[in-house]
Image (cartoon, coloured by chain):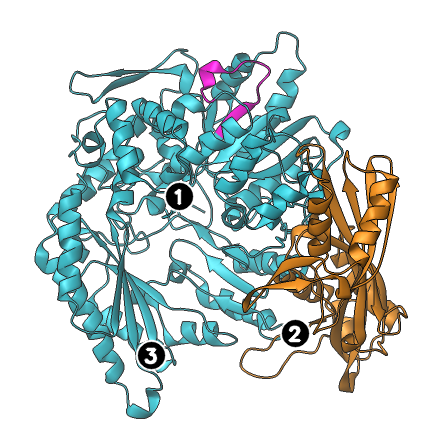
Chain colours: A orange, B cyan
Amino acid sequence: MLSADEIKALPLLAAPVTVRVMFTKTGSLRYISHLDLQRTLTRCLIRSRLPVWYTKGFNPHTKLVFSLPLSVGCESVYEFVDIKIERQISLADIKACLAPQFTDEMLILDVYYPTSKFAEIAYAEYECRIASSAASAEVARDICEYLSTSPVTVMKRSKSGEKEIDIVPLIHSVTCEAEEGELVLKMVLSASSDANLNPEYPIKAVCERFSLLRDESNDYYGIMRKKIYRGDMSAFN
Amino acid sequence: MKIATDDRYSSILKSVSKPGRYSGGEYGQIIKDKDSVKASFAFCFPDTYEIGMSNLGVRILYGVLNNDKDIRCERVYCPWTDMQEKMREHSIPLFAHESGDPVSEFDIVGFSLQYEMCYTNVLSMLSLSRIPLRSADRDESHPIIIGGGPCAYNAEPMADFFDVFNIGEGEEMLLEFTKMYIEEKEKPGYSKRKFLHKAAREIEGIYVPSFYEVSYNEDGTVEKYSPIYDDIPVKIKKRIVKDLDKVYFPENPVMPYIETVHDRIMLEVARGCIRGCRFCQAGMIYRPVREKSPEVLCKNAKCIYESSGYDEISLTSLSISDYSKIDELTDKLLEFTNPNMISLSLPSLRVDSFTKELMEKVASVRSSSLTFAPEAGTQRLRDVINKNVTEEDLMRAVGVAFEGGKSNVKLYFMMGLPTERDEDIVGIAELATHVIDRYYQMPKEMRKKAPSCTISVACLVPKPFTPFQWEAQDTLEELRRKQELLYNSIKDRRVKYNHHDAYVSRLEAVFARGDRRLSSAIALAHEKGFCFDAWDEYFNYEGWCEVFEQCGLDMSFYANRQYGIDEVLPWDIIDIGVTKEFFVRERNNAYSEKTTPSCREHCSGCGANKLGGENGCCPLMK
């Protein structure tokens, strides 16, 4: 692992290079907001001593670009952030410097030079586990049918106010299996900048429609973002 | 099992504000194997996570305790009201952040008592932990409840709820206490009482309230405090760390994920204060003045920078510009802060030692705000309170600030000071106007923005261990009248004025100088659901009045009464080094409008030097 002095002595690049970090956001981190995550990663970068490019000007700061926002309460094993490095340093060294600054709930999965842009992101896959006394193979089938048949209307909150929309066109695919007292709902939802569906909407709609959360103490759910796709359904990376 | 990682609680956590407060899992947290330790310590901060995480004392003690291989120390914060409601509804007991374990399962539960208005939060946390509130109601199955921090110097209002207090600096004392517990609990015939008796006998600074009986006179004042054992101190001497350079310093802070009040590296530069402003409790209770050397501070700063990722360093002490090697320290720090784009901030700058050089260093990377504390509007009153700054000093200081590019200055004042007259209040407005005028004395090219001067006015709360500890606080009517007088005296719209809530100040005064009988008021307030009294949205003055009435207690007895010089004070049981004789002398000097020089200019024999200490300015100190 490179020391701080060794890093400072690395040759300066003609132009800063973008490096993509793929990481997880699980466990205790699920309630950390996007802004908190930004702040946390900035500090990880400072601790790592990596030669990160700073904006020039009165208030120099790092520039972090994230892939997709994640709603509070949702975990993820497929998160990305692009950082700008201004000195010549190998990917292996970057990973070695950065990894110790993370925790086991925020793990680095990969560090590489990106060939794609975040604008290409079209879909996100979520796995939702619903613990419910109402779980059964029949309900699982009905849920798939329900989420595939328009209209399923929800009140969607946005900056401009509330709007009633049909979420079915934003649901690319859905599978649902019943396991022991639990429903595993896998959904691929629209996740582009102009058509993004927060997984809480279909889940809430389903829980309401099928009365899945009747017993407050024993019925509950958890959401995990598993993967992100491009428009052609190829995995985004 | 932590609630933050259990899906069962996700709907609860998603329904409360800032669920990140309860997550834990932070980088830098210390998690130990429960089976490998001999004692568990739950460190409770009776306010929100954001405030608790910014507290340097908690950071230090968390580090000190965890540094011992036999101790597991975890953090606990007061859940916000919405979360408290959910916790009671769903029977979720108060938990520690690291393991998620219920607080009631820890061996020792410590509370840091930072200010009087957090007392109801302490009770909320105890009740959420399902621990009986009163020490007398607890048995061997309950943890030992210990309190420390600034309010412990007069913790009498909370005495009934605590098993023990540690008075003074906890770095060594708390460790000794916990280690003694580990040793004692293994012995046959162990009981909490026996252990506390041994601690009270052998560890300096340990105060067990139940070992002292209090009797009162007919007029309501304290008659005496009588120890029930003859082998425990009659007066508990506070504990100090003699050499700040050698004391354990935690170099790996727990890094919060969410935004906290102080998101920066806090470097404690010195303890105690040489100035002796007569209203100031902190300056007295942290005496004798002791400094940390620049070498050690730089080392500390670099270590924390490397393990935290903060991009700002704040030098903290009661009067930073009085630090004897301030130039050397700032120069050394700038050697590494400048190239790493870390900004350096120096809060609480004294007017008379604020220089251009100092300001330039601070402004070198990013700017920080400039605040001065003249405290009183006229020289006469400043002399009474021994705030030895003149109007000239203030103008010179703001001149340096303005010429350095600042256009906003904040000034702190107090009202309700002894011997105060209306002209002193009007003097505040005049001083603010002179500050604005000073701005315009600069050449036009230097004036980039319109200037503003914000005056923030607090109400004097007479505090124990100050020369003003006997003073009567102004009545609410008088405080309100003065606030209005000041408001009407401000004619310049570039002067912004805000004042502290006089109602809160009144309650602070009651608890600051209170005795044990106030515990019934705190308990009743808790029963009625009072919590987060330091927060505007929850403070309920009428509610508190009712509480006091129902308990048969008179707030005026504590807040508005002139205490007798010969009276036995509830805090007489604590020895902070500085003597009562000194406070009496200083009080007389105040009324004679005579100033007292700083410790460096001339020793006034306050008595703190008898506690020892190194790297300070007391006579006979190394």
Please give left or right for residue A109 compared with residue B277 in the image.
right
Please give the chain letter of the residue carrying mark 2.
Answer: A
Within 10 Å of disc 2 (Cα), the crowding (few <14, some 14-19, many 20+) is some
On the same chain, marks 1 and 2? The answer is no
Within 10 Å of disc 3 (Cα), the crowding (few <14, some 14-19, many 20+) is many
Q: Which element is circle 3 on? A: helix
Q: Is residue B20 something one can see in this rendering?
A: yes
Please give left or right for residue B461 compared with residue B187 in the image.
left
Segment colored magenta:
B133-146
CA separation in Å, label 1 and label 3 = 33 Å
Amino acid at circle 1: Tyr
Please give the chain letter of the residue carrying mark 1.
Answer: B
The residue furthest right is A234
Compared to B78, does A165 lie above or below?
Answer: below
Where residue B456 sits in the image (x, y, percent)?
28, 60
* Snapshot quadrant of residue A92: bottom right
Compared to B522, does B605 lie above or below?
Answer: below
Q: Nearer the viewer, mark 2 or mark 3?
A: 2
Amino acid at circle 2: Thr
Q: Which element is circle 1 on? A: loop
Where residue B399 sits in the image (x, y, percent)?
29, 77
- The residue labelled by disc 3 is B402
* Snapshot quadrant of residue B168: top left
Please give the chain letter of the residue carrying mark 3.
Answer: B
- Membership of B134 in magenta stretch: yes
Amino acid at circle 3: Phe
| Residue appearing at x 25%, y 44% in the figure | B503
Q: Is residue A1 something one can see in this rendering?
A: no
- The residue labelled by disc 1 is B286
CA separation in Å, label 1 and label 2 = 40 Å
Total residue callouts: 3
- The residue labelled by disc 2 is A62
